[in-house]
Amino acid sequence: MTAIFRMVSFAVLACALAAPSWASAAALPEFRDIVRKSSPAVVKIVVQQSAAQAAHGQPGPEEMPEYLRRFFEFRGAPPDPREQMAMGSGFIISDDGYIVTNNHVVAGADSVLVRLSDRREFDAEVVGTDPRSDLALLRVEAEDLPVLELADGDDLEVGEWVLAIGSPFGLDYSVTAGIVSAKGRSLPTENNENYVPFIQTDVAINPGNSGGPLFNLEGEVVGVNSQIFTRSGGSIGLSFAIPVSVVRNVVEQLKNDGRVTRGWLGVTIQDVDKNLAESFGLERPRGALVSQVAKDSPAEKSGLESGDIILAFDGTEIATSSDLPHVVGLVAPESVVPVEVMRDRKRMKMKVKVGGLDADDSYSLTAGNGTTGGGGRLGVMVETAPQEVLERFGISGGVVVREVLPDSVASEAGILPGDIITLVGSTPIKSTEAFEEAVAGLGGGSSVPLRLIRRGSPLFIGLKLKD
């Protein structure tokens, strides 16, 4: 009897231990329906380009591992050594032939070939490209094509399952899955532009996946796979996708106009740290601190000033400075939007008319006798900035820091020799006399923002004065 009881007890225990595995397996998402329905609308893109252009694109077959080369297919005769193939992915968004992919997939292309999952091939026209968002719109002459549905908004949550389909290393229609690791990632371009709040995932993305769709569990496209972070050239679980809100905006403009115009303010901004938050009267670090306003820019015309901290823009809270370009870029030029700022330790609301920045536009920030002095309380030696320095940096006045004393307030705040101080608190600094007068008027133990120009770039620093 005892033996039977022990056997039954063991069986019950074994089932109990196994139950969590069964429960976990049952809770895992099912991807088969999404893959079955969506794969026909995912395309492989083969780009013919000059060798010089290809050097900046996807890897050619000679760069692939030996065991992968046999999967890489060319049409017709071997390519001319002066020309190379590059590959990427894309997806069809309308049954009359519009296809979304990455700009870097088709950049510099001499010809673009689109291959469907049923092996049909079409020569594609590049309707338009947008390097700032890394998106491109293609079109092929075909009808009744399978299409993918774009999600209505950016409602993804961190931890949510997502799925990617693409052609990594030429392996057609590969499927990988993972979760959303983070949202709103800022990855500035080589021109230090930052208009895309990337979705970060741990989905396995590799060269060739670029331009392919990222799906949610409803089978809707929530992003376009664009970049990976890697040390080996392959996936290490850090991939980035362009969110669907940016995709919708860019695609609509490319389809209608062949180019993209995005909202523009004309400001240089920086993050607010603990010292700056205290010096500007904020309860915690938040917002985008305006360190410089471009002359005749939309920001200047609307009344934004250097030293303003933008807390909300067009109804969206600005948590960090990198959030602001994401929001401004999606606003239609000439729109008037509500903005909340912190100015002189007081919150204020204002209306700002947003300007437009075309795809090929760039802009620079410009603004319309040298006795030496010392701000003894700060521990710096300064002199009035020479006229040639003011003209070089496009500023109307300031003092140049010649020496920073060790263990001083200035040293602790990070002020460096060569910095040009243009503002102490809300007081413009035009000369050493103005600087010394502004410093003398500061209260003991107070925090004050100090604006300076460092190597040509405007910057705010928070000073904590000693009692």
Image: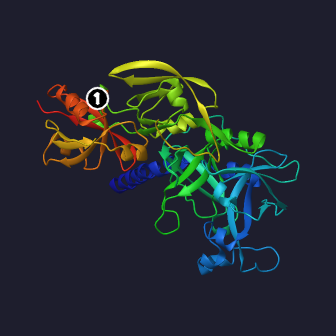
Is residue 135 placed above or below 65 in the rendered structure?
Answer: above
Say if residue 154 shows up in the picture.
no
Q: Nearer the viewer, residue 391 or 219?
A: 391
Q: Residue at x 22, y 41 (%)?
A: 371
Q: Residue at x 63, y 76 (%)?
A: 68
Q: Is residue 174 left or right of residue 370?
A: right
Q: Residue 450 in the image: x percent, y percent?
A: 29, 35
Q: Is residue 445 left or right of residue 339?
A: left
Color style of the picture: rainbow
Q: Is residue 166 left or right of residue 325?
A: right
Looking at the rendered structure, the kind of residue marked 1 is Gly
Residue lying farthest to the left in this orientation: 467
Q: Residue 117 in the image: x percent, y percent?
A: 78, 60
Secondary element at image label 1 = loop
Question: In the figure, residue 177 lies in which quadrant?
Answer: bottom right
Say if residue 114 shows up in the picture.
yes
Is residue 22 placed above or below 438 in the rendered structure?
Answer: below
Residue lying farthest to the front in this orientation: 369
Q: In this figure, which residue is indicated by the disc labeled 1?
A: 425
Q: Residue at x 14, y 27 (%)?
A: 444
Quarter of the figure that contains the C terminus? top left
Q: Residue 276 in the image: x percent, y percent?
A: 30, 34
Is residue 441 placed above or below 261 in the rendered structure?
Answer: above
Question: In the figure, residue 439 lies in which quadrant?
Answer: top left
Mark 1 surroundings within 10 Å by alpha-carbon count, few (fewer than 14), some (14 through 19), many (20 or more): many
Q: Nearer the viewer, residue 372 or 293?
A: 372
Is residue 351 placed above or below 306 in the rendered structure?
Answer: above
Q: Residue 101 in the image: x percent, y percent?
A: 69, 53
Q: Nearer the viewer, residue 345 or 327?
A: 345
